[in-house]
Amino acid sequence: MLEPHERAPDETMASTNTDELIAQLRELQREGEAAVQTAPDAATLEALRTLYVGRKGRLTTVLRRLGELSHEERPVVGAEANRVKEALAAALDLRETALAPAATADAGLDLSLPGRGRWTGGLHPVTRVIDEVCDIFRDLGFARVAGPEVETVEYNFTKLNTPLDHPAADMHDTFYLSDAVVLRTHTSPAQARVMEAFQPPVRVVVPGMAYRRDPYDASHAPAFAQIEGLAVDEGITFRDFKATLSEFVRRFFGPDAKTRFRPSFFPFTEPSAEVDVSCRLCAGRGCSACKYTGWMEIMGAGMVHPRVFAAVGYDAERYTGYAFGMGAARIAMQRYGLPDIRLLYEGDMRFLGQFT
Ligand code: 2NL
């Protein structure tokens, strides 16, 4: 009995083997492609690659039987085997590409996501206004100082010539912590402390939070940032007061900004004034922002009342001076064209993120 490869070519047997092998190869391709196309992950795919086209895989097993064929028939089956091998290799590669993004997603990476922006911090618009205002006054000779937010009734009202039956001192308009202690209603008590600690000349700006029992609406907040200023020396006049504040307005709002002083009343100044700036939006022509007046109110001010000097131990015959106070958020609203003060006190990053 001859071994198969020693057998003489036999037409019938050979063609039987050829047909069988070609049928096997086609079945291998069909089965392999089906398995590859539904492979759920890369590991399964690799196993299939080994199983079908690997060195000891099923395709190799079929190829080993090429020896059973005649020299004429070998190339026919060989060519078919190559075709199947290439078809399977192509199917494997295609599936590998299809599975690739899922594989990186498994590793916690999704390369198709848009990049993350760098988080850039910025100063709050109210802080910016405070810094800008204080910088301008620094150039004009004013030091920046701070004082306590919890104050005595004595410093918050009495020393500022505000009697306790004044409406501002009413229980209903002030946060009392006890009969004698309040959340300061303005930063003025800090200036009173400065005057008690230093003899004139004194020039200070005092930014800080102040508290009033106000409604929380588009133009009021019960906790608000204030900036006050005070200048005291021998010979300070109403002209110094007007000139200094007009210069501040030009530096803060622009060289063509006009300043208007309207008579007013505060218990701690005499005479007192409201200070207006020509509307930045309509240049004084009148628009909805300035309620068609052409002017926007920016601060209250006046010459320091002699009784305030007396209360802090200054010689009111020798010294004169001026003082002013403004709401930092109100100024920020005008500077940035904001319709509602609450935008500045609610920490919404959709709004604040625009200030970087
Ligand atoms: C306003 C008005 C003002 C003052 C504050 C002051 C302080 C001392 C003495 C005298 Cl120690 N005056 N401050 C004067 C006038 C007005 O503020 O509308 N603030 C938001």
Image (cartoon, helix red, strand yellow):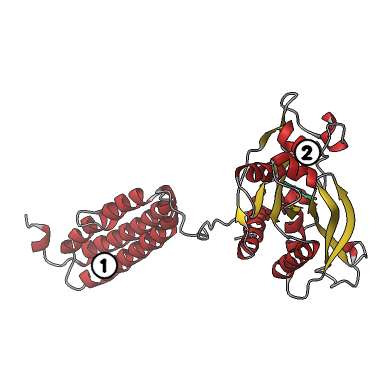
CB under 8 Å between discs 1 and 2: no
Q: CA distance from mark 1 to mark 2?
A: 97 Å
The first of marks 1 and 2 along the sequence is 1
For mark 1, give the secondary structure: helix
Q: Residue reaching furthest right?
A: 292
Which residue is identified by label 1? Answer: 77
For mark 2, give the secondary structure: loop
Question: Residue at 39% of width from left, 51% of height from top?
Answer: 35
Give the residue type that dot 1 points to: Val
Is 38 in front, or is 265?
A: 265
For the residue carrying disc 2, how many other residues have a C-alpha within 10 Å: few (<14), some (14-19), or many (20+)?
many
Check the picture and name the quadrant holding the N terminus: bottom left
Is 287 in front, or is 40?
A: 287
Q: Residue reaching furthest front?
A: 317
Q: Position of residue 172 (x, y in %)?
A: 84, 31
Check the picture and name the quadrant holding the C terminus: bottom right
Q: Residue reaching furthest top?
A: 179
Question: Residue at 42% of width from left, 48% of height from top?
Answer: 106
Give the residue type that dot 2 points to: Arg
Is 88 in front, or is 76?
A: 88
Which residue is identified by label 2? Answer: 212
Q: Residue reaching furthest left?
A: 1
Is 170 in front, or is 353?
A: 170
